[in-house]
Image: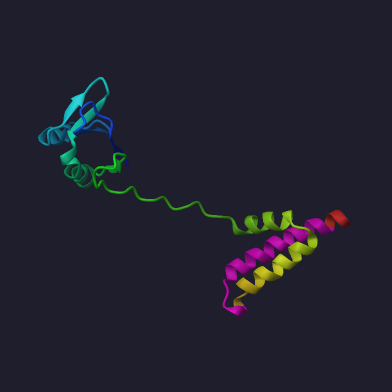
């Protein structure tokens, strides 16, 4: 999805700069709201008072993600991307690997008290804790043997 970015930079204080992919229909709509093209800055300049209306037009009619860097208007917030999934086993494995054998054993017990399904915990989280502990413990046993 394309993006339109409002910025506070403009040669005229009562105007706001806006950049977006070229579309002659959008250009006409901006002209209807008092916008003009600044070829040197490669930016459309629109009256600050029209910011909310223009934001609505760009988002609703032209399906652009509107980013407001000005702090002046009520541009639509950009949707937050889902965070990348975390490999829980790798997370716990890294934690156990940094601990001494005794500390890892104690941390394993503490985590299982929190996550064990018999104690209303999360089954998948308990499995991840056990898998990570078993991998790290297996490495330590191979090193010692």
What is the chief secondary structure element of the magenta stretch?
helix
- Furthest residue in direction top, as rendered: 40
Work out whether 95 lies above or below 54: below
The residue at 59%/66% (across/down) is 125
Which percent across, then down, holds residue 124?
58, 67
Report which quarter residue 5 is drawn in. Answer: top left
Q: Where is residue 31 in the image (x, y as percent from the top left)?
A: 12, 32
Residue at the front extreme, as displayed = 13
Residue at the image point whose x is 21% and y is 47% from the top: 60
**Res. 47 image quadrant:** top left
In the image, 49: left or right of 112? left
The residues colored magenta run: 118-141
Q: Which residue lies furthest to the right in this view?
A: 145
Name the residue at 23% across, 26% down. Answer: 11
Instruction: Looking at the picture, tell me which residue is in the foreground, 27 or 75.
Output: 75
Compared with residue 68, is residue 106 higher up or lower down, i.e. above or below? below
Give the quadrant of the N terminus.
top left
Position of 54 with respect to 88 (left or right) is left
């Amino acid at each position: 999805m394309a993006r339109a970015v409002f910025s506070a930079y403009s040669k005229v204080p009562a105007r706001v700069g806006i950049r977006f992919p070229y579309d002659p229909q959008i250009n006409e709509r901006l002209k209807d709201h008092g916008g003009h093209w600044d070829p040197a800055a490669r930016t459309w300049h629109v009256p600050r008072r029209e910011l909310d209306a223009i934001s609505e037009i760009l988002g609703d009619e032209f399906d652009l993600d509107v980013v407001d860097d000005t702090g002046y208007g009520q541009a639509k917030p950009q949707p937050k991307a889902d965070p990348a999934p975390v490999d829980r086993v790798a997370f716990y494995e890294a934690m156990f690997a940094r601990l001494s054998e005794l500390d890892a054993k104690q941390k394993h017990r503490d985590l299982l008290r929190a996550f064990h399904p018999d104690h209303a915990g999360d089954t998948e989280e308990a499995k991840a804790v056990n898998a990570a502990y078993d991998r790290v413990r297996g490495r330590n046993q191979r090193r010692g043997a």
